Image: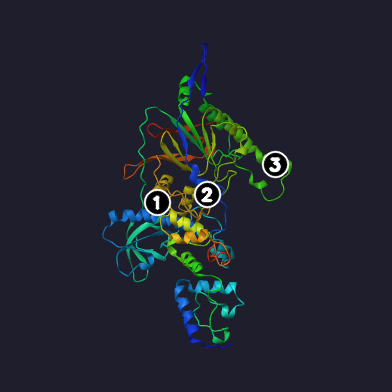
Amino acid sequence: MRVDVEMSGGSPKLLERKQAVYRNLDERYEIHGEKYKGQQYSHIYFTRLHYMRNLLYSLVPKWKPNLPVNTVLGLEEEKECIIVGTIYKHMKLKPSILDEYSKERSKVPLAKPHNFVHPDDHLILEDESGRVKLAGSLLDPSAFVTGIVVALHGKETSEGKFFVLDMLEAGLPPQIKQPPSLKDKFVVFVSGLSIGSSTFNPLQFQLLVDHITGHLGDENEQTFASQIVHFIIAGNSVQILQGLLNGQTIAPRDQSTLTEPIKELDILLNQLAAAMPVDIMPGPSDPANFSLPQQPLNRCLFPGASAYNTFISSTNPHQFELDDIQFLGTSGQNIDDLFKYSEAKNKLEFMERTLRWRHLVPTAPNTLGCFPFTDRDPFLIESCPHVYFVGNQDKYETTLLRGSDNQSVRLICIPKFCETGVAVMLNLRNLECHALSFSTSLNV
Amino acid sequence: MASGDIKGFYRQKKKQQKGGITKSVSASASKKKKPSKSGGSATLGATDPQTPVLFAHGAFDLTDDYGEDEERLRQFDMDMRYGPCIGLTRLQRWERASSMGLQPPADLRNLLSRASGPKSPDLECLWEGRV
């Protein structure tokens, strides 16, 4: 892949784009034609509990060596012990399908809140043998969600609740040491293009594409652009006009309106794929399946771009390796759902929590759609990534998270490009991040 | 005919204890399947004893539909250690338990893989089609 440099007078100099060794690790998120046979979600919870419980059992002796470990049904009153189970958070404001049938219409608020947290929410711990309500002020329900597995130290009270004295989370998973690299190589992340929506500015994205492919700027800019080795689009690339999709037959002229955004995206992807490896992930508004893990966007949607072997349609969540650096990311559904059902300082704190709980999407399948796997839970995080990114967020945020076992993770919140015009650039050498901002307004 | 056969009574109670954990669930499930049979043929246990007048010969047709192999597989279905049983075939559940390191009994797998013939154990779990 070459970037031409045109200098006034004199022969053009050719700049070679750098390359990085890419390995796609999406296999665990692919459905592989598995058919839905009518099974329920109990299996995914069972496999999740089994895996996390074994993990926590191995960590408990170091944490509290002298206490017995019980199942929920084996709790005895006033006897201190450790129990391991899945947390269930009972939420007063959580929308329930049964509200439609409820006679008391007044309980349902007219305006849907964005956040369903209420001071009356309480936590329950559950394993195969039973459930127990959690009491005590150590655990703040607003920081937890249904679906995480933890170990609790406490004792059963006379009311039959479990008074919590201490809690153990699994913590950051072990990380494979990242090999040191000498050269500056950059990865660009973008998300929320929303082609087809009213907020999409074609010039803005074209600016981004031209800058990255090296068609803009002088030699310095182009040298900089030649160091970009990979481009990731983290979801919500198109926005299909919902008004037309109401179940009635679509008139031929409306049919072309429906497919316009995808065609436009294909043209842009064509330009990108001709220049460098591009990964496109599906997002909540893309034409992919709704429940996680979202399967790769069909290559037939991109007849132009899929001709290139640099074009990769990936799953959501997306896991890959670039020069032995582990990347893990989603298009935002996991963090957005955590935001609806719990509270934290900022989105980075939600991301940190998912790593500490070792589960990418703890609220699936409770409040986030998920495929009912029977034999595995693919969202368990077994090894710590070096870079963890989440797309379609409100603003660009990043931090370097340090773990207790020498892990170091770069957390990145990628903002929506259609609203902010910001793409994120990551340096593979030192995992430093900065924002690339594009603006087309004339009064800057 | 009214048999008042005490031995028949005791036989039924023993069967009850074996399937003890599944008392209420199985009673309703088996009632659904064979409503015509006498007394709702509470195979794995009903809480109230059957009135003698409903017995045909004093002995219950409890093992009519399944043999000992099926009974062992039913116990495998009901064992909580291996997780939920609905929605998977027994073989799939065995494979899952095996890959999770739970060490299910190996001879159950042999039973399931050579299932053939009329008296063979069912490949699907106990509640398949009933729930």
Q: Which badge, 1 or 3, comes first in the chain's sequence?
A: 3
* Mark 2–mark 1 CB contact (< 8 Å): no
| Residue located beneath label 2 in the image | A292
| Marks 2 and 1 belong to one chain | yes
Q: Which badge, 2 or 1, comes first in the chain's sequence?
A: 2
What amino acid is at disc 1?
Trp
Callout in the foreground (1, 3)? 1
| The quadrant where residue A119 appears | bottom left
Q: Nearer the viewer, residue A176 or A204?
A: A176
Q: Position of residue A100 (x, y in %)?
A: 58, 63
Q: Nearer the viewer, residue A130 or A93?
A: A130
Mark 1 — on which chain does it sit? A
Mark 2 — on which chain does it sit? A
Q: CA distance from mark 2 to mark 3?
A: 28 Å
Which residue shows up at 59% across the image and 74% down it? B34
Q: Give the SS element for disc 2.
A: loop
Which residue shows up at 44% across the image and 53% down it? B99
Q: CA distance from mark 2 to mark 1?
A: 18 Å
Callout in the foreground (2, 3)? 2
Q: Position of residue A422 (x, y in %)?
A: 49, 35
Does residue A405 appear in this view? yes
* Mark 2–mark 3 CB contact (< 8 Å): no
Which residue shows up at 57% across the image and 58% down it? A38
- Mark 3 Cα shell of 10 Å, populated few (<14), some (14-19), many (≥20): few
Q: Nearer the viewer, residue A207 or B102?
A: B102
Tell whether A402 sits left or right of A209. left
Q: Position of residue A313 (x, y in %)?
A: 55, 38
Q: Which mark is residue A255?
A: 3
Q: Which mark is residue A357?
A: 1
Q: Nearer the viewer, residue B112 or A374?
A: B112
Q: Give the SS element for disc 3.
A: helix
What amino acid is at disc 2?
Leu
